[in-house]
Image: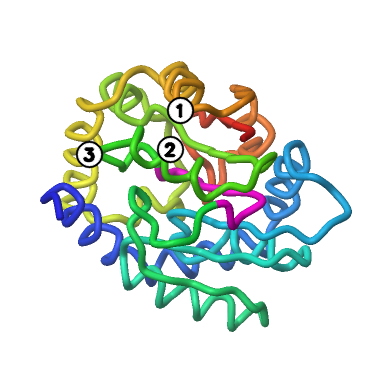
Amino acid sequence: MEPIKERVINYWSRRAEGFEKQRLREYGSEKHERWLAEFRRYLPQGEKLRILDIGTGTGFFACVLAAEGHETVGIDLAPEMIEHAGHMAGVLGLDVRFAVMDAESPDLPSESFDAVVTRNLTWTLPDVQKAYTEWHRLLKKGGVLINFDADYSAALEKDDEPELPENHAHKLVPQEMKAENDAITLEIGKRQKPRPEWDVELLTGIGFEKVTVDTEVYKRIYAEVDEFYNPVPIFTVAAYK
Protein backbone atom coordinates (compact mmCIF):
# COMPACT_ATOMS: atom_id res chain seq x y z
CA MET A 1 0.00 0.00 0.00
CA GLU A 2 1.22 3.50 -0.83
CA PRO A 3 2.41 5.48 2.21
CA ILE A 4 -0.07 8.27 1.41
CA LYS A 5 -2.96 5.81 1.72
CA GLU A 6 -1.68 4.67 5.10
CA ARG A 7 -1.65 8.30 6.22
CA VAL A 8 -5.23 8.74 4.99
CA ILE A 9 -6.32 5.62 6.93
CA ASN A 10 -4.58 6.81 10.09
CA TYR A 11 -6.07 10.30 9.90
CA TRP A 12 -9.67 9.22 9.31
CA SER A 13 -9.45 6.38 11.81
CA ARG A 14 -8.71 8.94 14.51
CA ARG A 15 -11.79 10.91 13.46
CA ALA A 16 -14.19 7.96 13.18
CA GLU A 17 -15.95 8.21 16.55
CA GLY A 18 -16.67 11.92 16.34
CA PHE A 19 -17.54 11.57 12.68
CA GLU A 20 -20.28 9.02 13.46
CA LYS A 21 -21.83 11.33 16.04
CA GLN A 22 -21.89 14.21 13.57
CA ARG A 23 -23.29 12.08 10.75
CA LEU A 24 -26.08 10.89 13.04
CA ARG A 25 -26.93 14.51 13.77
CA GLU A 26 -26.84 15.27 10.06
CA TYR A 27 -29.14 12.32 9.40
CA GLY A 28 -31.68 13.87 11.74
CA SER A 29 -31.33 17.35 10.29
CA GLU A 30 -32.76 19.13 7.23
CA LYS A 31 -29.62 18.05 5.33
CA HIS A 32 -31.09 14.54 5.10
CA GLU A 33 -33.89 15.67 2.78
CA ARG A 34 -31.58 18.02 0.89
CA TRP A 35 -29.24 15.17 0.01
CA LEU A 36 -32.20 13.03 -1.06
CA ALA A 37 -33.37 15.84 -3.31
CA GLU A 38 -29.97 15.82 -5.02
CA PHE A 39 -30.06 12.05 -5.50
CA ARG A 40 -33.51 12.31 -7.07
CA ARG A 41 -32.00 14.45 -9.82
CA TYR A 42 -30.03 11.45 -11.05
CA LEU A 43 -31.51 8.19 -9.76
CA PRO A 44 -34.45 6.48 -11.48
CA GLN A 45 -37.54 6.80 -9.31
CA GLY A 46 -40.08 4.20 -8.25
CA GLU A 47 -37.81 1.15 -8.19
CA LYS A 48 -35.53 -0.56 -5.71
CA LEU A 49 -31.92 -0.02 -6.70
CA ARG A 50 -28.66 -1.68 -5.72
CA ILE A 51 -26.36 1.14 -4.70
CA LEU A 52 -22.69 1.20 -3.71
CA ASP A 53 -21.48 4.00 -1.41
CA ILE A 54 -17.73 4.29 -1.92
CA GLY A 55 -15.73 6.00 0.82
CA THR A 56 -18.82 5.59 2.97
CA GLY A 57 -17.11 6.83 6.14
CA THR A 58 -19.59 6.10 8.91
CA GLY A 59 -22.27 5.20 6.37
CA PHE A 60 -24.31 8.39 5.95
CA PHE A 61 -25.21 8.02 2.26
CA ALA A 62 -25.66 4.26 2.58
CA CYS A 63 -28.11 4.78 5.44
CA VAL A 64 -29.98 7.65 3.78
CA LEU A 65 -30.54 5.55 0.65
CA ALA A 66 -31.31 2.34 2.56
CA ALA A 67 -34.06 4.20 4.42
CA GLU A 68 -35.62 4.90 1.00
CA GLY A 69 -35.87 1.16 0.34
CA HIS A 70 -32.74 0.62 -1.72
CA GLU A 71 -30.23 -2.20 -1.22
CA THR A 72 -27.04 -0.44 -0.19
CA VAL A 73 -23.44 -1.48 0.30
CA GLY A 74 -20.82 0.80 1.83
CA ILE A 75 -17.06 0.43 1.54
CA ASP A 76 -14.20 2.38 3.08
CA LEU A 77 -10.46 1.95 3.44
CA ALA A 78 -10.45 2.75 7.16
CA PRO A 79 -11.54 -0.21 9.35
CA GLU A 80 -12.56 2.12 12.19
CA MET A 81 -14.91 3.99 9.87
CA ILE A 82 -16.54 0.73 8.79
CA GLU A 83 -16.94 -0.32 12.42
CA HIS A 84 -18.74 2.94 13.20
CA ALA A 85 -20.80 2.67 9.99
CA GLY A 86 -22.16 -0.66 11.18
CA HIS A 87 -22.97 0.89 14.53
CA MET A 88 -24.70 3.86 12.90
CA ALA A 89 -26.87 1.60 10.73
CA GLY A 90 -27.77 -0.39 13.84
CA VAL A 91 -28.77 2.73 15.75
CA LEU A 92 -31.01 3.70 12.83
CA GLY A 93 -32.41 0.18 12.45
CA LEU A 94 -31.25 -0.16 8.86
CA ASP A 95 -29.96 -3.20 6.99
CA VAL A 96 -26.77 -2.13 5.21
CA ARG A 97 -23.73 -4.23 4.31
CA PHE A 98 -20.35 -2.63 5.00
CA ALA A 99 -16.84 -3.80 4.11
CA VAL A 100 -13.25 -2.56 4.32
CA MET A 101 -12.15 -2.07 0.73
CA ASP A 102 -9.92 0.15 -1.41
CA ALA A 103 -11.91 2.57 -3.61
CA GLU A 104 -9.30 2.20 -6.35
CA SER A 105 -9.59 -1.59 -6.50
CA PRO A 106 -12.95 -2.71 -5.05
CA ASP A 107 -13.26 -6.49 -4.82
CA LEU A 108 -16.81 -6.61 -6.16
CA PRO A 109 -18.44 -8.21 -9.22
CA SER A 110 -18.64 -6.34 -12.50
CA GLU A 111 -21.96 -4.78 -13.51
CA SER A 112 -23.51 -5.43 -10.10
CA PHE A 113 -24.78 -1.96 -9.14
CA ASP A 114 -27.42 0.40 -10.50
CA ALA A 115 -25.63 3.37 -8.95
CA VAL A 116 -22.32 4.26 -7.36
CA VAL A 117 -22.35 7.25 -5.01
CA THR A 118 -19.54 9.01 -3.21
CA ARG A 119 -18.97 12.14 -1.16
CA ASN A 120 -15.71 13.96 -0.47
CA LEU A 121 -13.61 10.97 -1.49
CA THR A 122 -11.92 11.47 -4.86
CA TRP A 123 -9.77 14.31 -3.54
CA THR A 124 -8.06 11.72 -1.28
CA LEU A 125 -7.30 9.21 -4.07
CA PRO A 126 -3.77 8.99 -5.52
CA ASP A 127 -5.10 7.47 -8.77
CA VAL A 128 -8.52 8.90 -9.63
CA GLN A 129 -8.44 7.52 -13.15
CA LYS A 130 -8.00 3.99 -11.83
CA ALA A 131 -10.88 4.50 -9.40
CA TYR A 132 -13.21 5.85 -12.09
CA THR A 133 -12.31 2.94 -14.37
CA GLU A 134 -13.18 0.45 -11.63
CA TRP A 135 -16.43 2.22 -10.79
CA HIS A 136 -17.41 2.08 -14.47
CA ARG A 137 -16.80 -1.69 -14.32
CA LEU A 138 -19.07 -2.07 -11.30
CA LEU A 139 -22.02 -0.28 -12.89
CA LYS A 140 -24.73 -2.01 -14.86
CA LYS A 141 -25.43 -0.68 -18.33
CA GLY A 142 -27.43 2.51 -17.87
CA GLY A 143 -26.19 2.90 -14.29
CA VAL A 144 -25.01 6.19 -12.86
CA LEU A 145 -22.03 7.40 -10.86
CA ILE A 146 -22.86 10.36 -8.59
CA ASN A 147 -19.80 12.05 -7.14
CA PHE A 148 -20.04 14.98 -4.72
CA ASP A 149 -16.61 16.51 -4.20
CA ALA A 150 -14.57 19.73 -4.34
CA ASP A 151 -11.15 20.92 -5.42
CA TYR A 152 -9.85 20.95 -1.86
CA SER A 153 -6.19 21.33 -2.81
CA ALA A 154 -6.87 24.46 -4.86
CA ALA A 155 -9.03 25.86 -2.04
CA LEU A 156 -6.32 25.19 0.54
CA GLU A 157 -3.76 27.07 -1.52
CA LYS A 158 -6.09 30.10 -1.59
CA ASP A 159 -6.40 29.96 2.23
CA ASP A 160 -9.61 31.99 2.47
CA GLU A 161 -11.74 29.81 4.75
CA PRO A 162 -14.61 31.81 6.31
CA GLU A 163 -15.24 32.05 10.04
CA LEU A 164 -16.93 28.87 11.24
CA PRO A 165 -19.19 28.20 14.25
CA GLU A 166 -17.56 26.83 17.39
CA ASN A 167 -19.30 23.44 17.04
CA HIS A 168 -18.01 22.95 13.50
CA ALA A 169 -15.90 19.81 12.95
CA HIS A 170 -12.95 21.87 11.71
CA LYS A 171 -12.86 23.73 15.01
CA LEU A 172 -12.85 20.51 17.03
CA VAL A 173 -9.91 18.87 15.22
CA PRO A 174 -6.57 19.29 17.04
CA GLN A 175 -4.05 21.52 15.26
CA GLU A 176 -1.61 18.69 14.56
CA MET A 177 -4.36 16.67 12.88
CA LYS A 178 -5.44 19.68 10.82
CA ALA A 179 -1.83 20.13 9.71
CA GLU A 180 -1.65 16.47 8.67
CA ASN A 181 -4.90 16.74 6.72
CA ASP A 182 -3.59 19.85 4.95
CA ALA A 183 -0.34 18.05 4.10
CA ILE A 184 -2.24 15.05 2.69
CA THR A 185 -4.50 17.36 0.68
CA LEU A 186 -1.59 19.21 -0.91
CA GLU A 187 0.42 16.05 -1.62
CA ILE A 188 -2.46 14.30 -3.40
CA GLY A 189 -3.41 17.58 -5.07
CA LYS A 190 -0.10 17.53 -6.94
CA ARG A 191 -1.33 14.42 -8.77
CA GLN A 192 -4.62 16.00 -9.81
CA LYS A 193 -5.70 18.68 -12.28
CA PRO A 194 -8.29 21.45 -11.83
CA ARG A 195 -11.66 20.03 -10.99
CA PRO A 196 -14.38 19.27 -12.00
CA GLU A 197 -13.08 19.81 -15.55
CA TRP A 198 -10.54 17.04 -15.04
CA ASP A 199 -13.22 14.66 -13.82
CA VAL A 200 -15.23 15.19 -17.00
CA GLU A 201 -12.13 14.52 -19.08
CA LEU A 202 -11.34 11.30 -17.23
CA LEU A 203 -14.89 9.97 -17.18
CA THR A 204 -15.47 10.68 -20.87
CA GLY A 205 -12.18 9.01 -21.76
CA ILE A 206 -13.05 5.92 -19.73
CA GLY A 207 -16.26 5.46 -21.70
CA PHE A 208 -19.14 6.93 -19.75
CA GLU A 209 -21.90 7.80 -22.22
CA LYS A 210 -22.98 11.08 -20.61
CA VAL A 211 -21.31 13.28 -18.00
CA THR A 212 -22.96 16.28 -16.32
CA VAL A 213 -21.62 18.81 -13.81
CA ASP A 214 -23.52 20.90 -11.26
CA THR A 215 -21.48 23.62 -9.55
CA GLU A 216 -24.48 25.08 -7.70
CA VAL A 217 -25.19 22.10 -5.43
CA TYR A 218 -23.28 23.61 -2.50
CA LYS A 219 -25.74 26.51 -2.39
CA ARG A 220 -28.64 24.10 -1.92
CA ILE A 221 -27.00 21.77 0.60
CA TYR A 222 -25.06 24.31 2.63
CA ALA A 223 -27.49 27.23 2.75
CA GLU A 224 -26.58 27.93 6.40
CA VAL A 225 -23.22 28.23 8.12
CA ASP A 226 -23.82 25.55 10.75
CA GLU A 227 -21.88 22.59 12.14
CA PHE A 228 -22.31 20.71 8.84
CA TYR A 229 -21.24 23.62 6.63
CA ASN A 230 -18.60 22.92 4.00
CA PRO A 231 -16.50 26.07 3.46
CA VAL A 232 -15.26 24.75 0.09
CA PRO A 233 -17.89 24.84 -2.70
CA ILE A 234 -18.69 21.27 -3.67
CA PHE A 235 -19.77 20.16 -7.14
CA THR A 236 -21.69 17.16 -8.45
CA VAL A 237 -20.38 15.07 -11.31
CA ALA A 238 -22.92 12.55 -12.62
CA ALA A 239 -21.74 10.04 -15.18
CA TYR A 240 -23.98 7.52 -16.97
CA LYS A 241 -22.73 4.20 -18.34
Residue with the mark numbered 1: 206
Membership of 115 in magenta stretch: yes
Residue at 75 percent of width and 52 percent of height: 33
Quarter holding residue 77:
bottom left
For marks 3 and 2 on the same chain, the one whose residue lies earlier in the sequence: 2
**Residue 112 versus residue 64: which sits nearer the camera?**
112
What secondary structure is marked by label 2?
helix
Q: Identify the disc placed on residue 132.
A: 2
Q: Identify the disc placed on residue 75.
A: none
Residue type indicated by callout 3: Asp
How far apart marks 3 and 2 lie (CA) works out to: 24 Å
Q: Is residue 156 left or right of residue 1?
A: right
What secondary structure is marked by label 1?
helix
Membership of 201 in magenta stretch: no
Q: Which residues are magenta?
A: 111-121
Residue at 17 percent of width and 34 percent of height: 187
Total number of numbered discs in the rendering:
3
